[in-house]
Image (cartoon, helix red, strand yellow):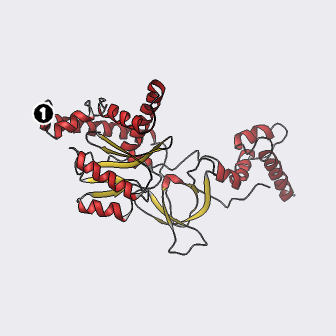
Amino acid sequence: RDSRKTDRQRTLIINYHNGLTNHRGAIETLAQLKRHNYWTDMLGTIKRVIAECSVCNESKYERHPAITPQQVTETPTKHLDQVQADIWYWEGTKTLTMIDVATRFLFTKCIERRTSQRVKEGILEFCSVVGIPKLLIMDSGTEFNDRLVRKVLTELSIESHTTTPGHARSHGVIERLHLTLGEHMRLLEKSKRIKGPEAVARATLAYNRTIHSATNKTPIELMRAWCRIEKDLPIEEDMGAIADRIRDEKLKRTEKINKQKEYKKPRELKPGIIKNLIRRRKSDPLYIGPYIVREVLSRHRVILGKETWSRNKSIIRHLEEVRVRTRKSKECK
């Protein structure tokens, strides 16, 4: 009798969940079903049934994503201490962008193809025009992680660091830069009908001559001061104060973000947990899987694999890219 009652409840939930409402959530389903039905722990039953739906697990956004506390990273105190590099796309135009973190000085180079050869040429041009950086931070794209690029970095004695895939905040300075560049590109197209490489060059010029909120100076002023081209800025005192201002601002923002996350506990992972992995293309299902956690690494990374894969085959992803599956999912039928 109890079994028949449970089956009937499950059928009611699945019929409504798969019906005209197109896989809506537990609260919506409860609001509809309780008009004509009632049983004990109605909401709990609905949540358990919907949690097993594979369509929802693969296609819906994660409403409570993994929480990774912000860390205060090292603040460069002089120009070329740290440079970030990335490839930026805008309406068919590919651009290698490199920004000096201390001065916010921007270098751009439009490229025809996203290859390691073009990246190598761009790095060499940056070094010849701006200077040789101590540390170059790059994303995990194959055009950066190639022997041609590694070879030129070794020749120039440049240390390199590769960011964690799927974690844009570890590349935060240049990611925010791309938003600003996009704004400049829209303004140039709207006001002057300028597109393509010329617009990129004009946007770079505008960015380097705009006072930055973190430094209260323009990037070109700071770069010239460090290069001792202009004597308007006392290098030792002024740059020290600017570095302190950047460090204080970063500390304030980090504390604010972490304070907002205090009510949430960081997700703890252990090997063996089943997870789905996020997809990056907008037209695809949001999550694919399942994957099995094989090992938990530092910097909020995990090694994932599948039951059908050998131990030698695995992928590394950031914690924020994965969704925990508490039970085996299946299609609602």
- Looking at the image, residue 196 lies above or below residue 308: above
Residue 93 placed where, x, y %?
A: 46, 43
Side of 81 where 183 appears, left or right: right
Side of 328 where 158 appears, left or right: left
- Looking at the image, residue 151 lies above or below residue 322: below
Report if residue 318 is visible in the image.
yes
- Looking at the image, residue 310 lies above or below residue 68: below
**Figure quadrant of the C terminus:** bottom right
- Decide which of 125, 22 is in the foreground and name it: 125
Circle 1: element type? loop
Classed neighbour count for the residue bearing mark 1: other residues with Cα under 10 Å, few (<14), some (14–19), many (≥20):
few
- Decide which of 194, 142 is in the foreground and name it: 194
Rendered residue at 40%/36% (across/down): 198
- Decide which of 201, 140 is in the foreground and name it: 201
Q: Amino acid at mark 1?
A: Pro
Residue 240 placed where, x, y %?
A: 17, 38
Q: Which quadrant of the view contains residue 217? A: top left
Residue assigned mark 1: 234
Q: Which quadrant of the view contains residue 297? A: bottom left
Side of 325 where 15 appears, left or right: right
- Looking at the image, residue 312 lies above or below residue 16: below
How many numbered discs? 1
Rendered residue at 75%/45% (across/down): 42
**Figure quadrant of the N terminus:** bottom right
Residue 84 placed where, x, y %?
A: 33, 48
Residue 132 placed where, x, y %?
A: 23, 51
Rendered residue at 50%/52% (across/down): 320
Report if residue 325 is visible in the image.
no
